[in-house]
Every structure is written in structure tokens, then in C-alpha cells.
Amino acid sequence: MVILTGIDGLEIRELKFIKVDVDLSDTKDFEIQIPASEWSSDLEYKGRIFIPGTEYGGRIGGKGASTQKDVRTIRGHTWRGMLDKKIIKPPAGEDYKIVSGELNAILKQLIQEAGMTALFTVSEENTGVLITSYQFDRYITLLSGIQKMLKTKGYRIDIQYVQGERGLPGYVQIGAVPVIDYSERIELSQDSQLNFKFDENKNGVNHLICLGKGDLKERLVVDLYIQRDGSVGTTQYFKGLDEVAETYENNAIDDVTEMTEKGTEEIIERASKQTFEMDVERLGIEVEIGDIIGGRDYITGMHLAKPVVNKIYKQEQSVISKEYKLEGDEQ
């Protein structure tokens, strides 16, 4: 079920659709194909769509039409996508944004500073977990900043769209919750009698040469390397035939620290990845981004126990699929 609301957040109707595609953490967007016969003027920009009781949803920011297929399309940023379009900036006269306090209290402060309280609220629950003088990366996105901060405490961000009471608008509620490690109690394999799919790419970049401001020998150059455990460092681990090198250029950067931050984000995007896809719902659990799952294929020997970094929800007619993506595996 996909619900449509107006700009004011008041529910209008259940959408009849052909296909739904929601990518929570990679492209951070959604697209819904609707029969032309179901199109009406209530599908307006800045309206919202959501699947009740889940994170799946977002704000309408684009429309399209295919007269050949008699299909109309709406698309937009997911809630994570909206958080990703806000930047945490250092206070005036300061080098970094630094915060201290209880996790949800910090999230509330960040949402207020980003000017997002018209749609986003923060859980009032006291996690009992305190942060002391946490330093955000310079000009990091709000989403990435929150995720990196929570990860230092073994927590993740929880996001859900909450339906409003009759006559009241709904809202997006976020909060800090502990990461759940499902790999300690469930390892998905042939023994589980569930179909799943592994896709492993070991050809990812493990050496990124970051090129900044300057010319020739005066140009800023920072070398970054993927380590054996998937982390990023300045010491080369993969050498010779195992080295996979590429360049990254940003002529606006003349600072080593800033280039290292930007380059780290870039090499992580280009690094080797594993994708794991299966019907987790048949296990009776709802795995969220940040939680850890494990899987094993006895024939190929592929094995993983990694945090989920993305979920892709697809529905065509009554067939629902969810793809879980894990990154940062050893190369």
C-alpha cells in the first residue's frame, strides 16, 4: 500500500500503481509508475508518498510521462535523500562543528539547525548514551554526519514515516537505535532453504590518487589506499597485480585534510563491493540500514557478515522484493 498526501501532509488517497522502486541509501530516491487513467491533479510537487509503518517514502520532486506505454511517473528524494541534501557547516569563526550530549538530543539540535522541523521530528527517548566533543568532518552532509557519529557508539539512525491522526498531518520521525547483529544468530545459507543471491566484485579501486589545486609539480596530490579490512589509509596494502588505481580531481581543494576527507568518500564509492539479495521477510525479521547480516554459499565459498548500507524496495503489481547491499568487505 502506497499512500499519497498533499503538501500539507494530510492523507489524500491510496495510490494505484504499476511499479514502485525505492532506493534508500544509494541514489536515495523513489520512482512510481502510475496508469494514465489514475493520474489526477492531487499528484503535486512537494506532496508526499509513503508505505505505512516503514521508512519507504519521500517527497515528490519530479514527474514524467510515456504516452506510448500510457504510463505516468512521479519521483523524488527519500527521507534519507532529504537529509543528504543538507550540509553540516562549521560555526562562524570555527574550523569544525563539535557537539556533546545525549544521542537523540544531538539529533534534535541538528534537525533544528537544518530547518527541517516542518517535516522531521526526533524521538524523545533518552538512549542513555552520551557523546563528548564529537567533531564532524567539514561540510559533511547531514545524513553522513549523523551516521558516522552514531556508528562510533554502535548505534544507527532509525527513520519512519508516522501517519497523522484523523485530520492531522503525518511526519518523519528519526531516532538513534542500537545496531542489531543478526549474523550472530542467523547465517543465511543453503541450509536455511531460502533462495538468495550473492554478487561479489573484487575489481574495485584500492588506490585513489587525489589531485587538487595547482599545476604540475606544485599540484596538491594525496594518495589513499583501501586496507585489507576495507578501511581507508595512506599506506599501500594491495600492490603489483592486485593494485587497482584511478584518479580523482577537484581543482577547488588546496588543503590536505579536506582532500583526504573528499577522497575517502570517493574511494569508498569505487571500492570492491558485495551485494546480497534475498527475501529476509520470510525469516520474520526486518533488517534495517546499519544492522549486520551474514550469509554463506557453500559452492563458491563466498561468505560475509557485514552492515547493511542500502535497501532497495521494489513492487510490481503484488510482487515485492527487497535487495540488501553490503560494502567495505575485504578485497
Image (tube, rainbow, N blue to C red):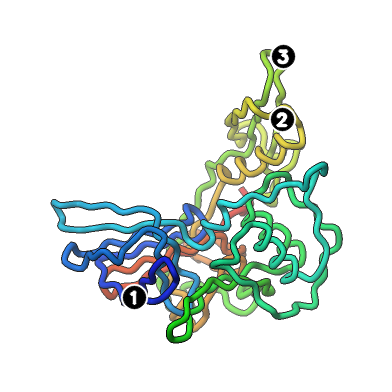
Which residue in the protein does label 2 denote?
222
Is disc 1 surrounded by few (<14), some (14 to 19) or many (20+) residues within 10 Å? some
Please, is residue 80 above or below residue 105 in the view?
above
Residue 82 x %, y %: 53, 57
The secondary element bearing badge 3 is classed as helix
Numbered badge on residue 217: 3
Label 1 – label 3 distance at C-alpha: 62 Å
The secondary element bearing badge 1 is classed as strand
Residue 320 x %, y %: 35, 72
Front in this rendered view, residue 92 or 63:
92
Which residue in the protein does label 1 denote?
12
Residue 243 x %, y %: 62, 34
N-terminal-most mark, 3 or 2: 3
State the residue lying farthest toward the left: 68
Question: Does residue 301 appear in this view?
Answer: no
N-terminal-most mark, 1 or 2: 1
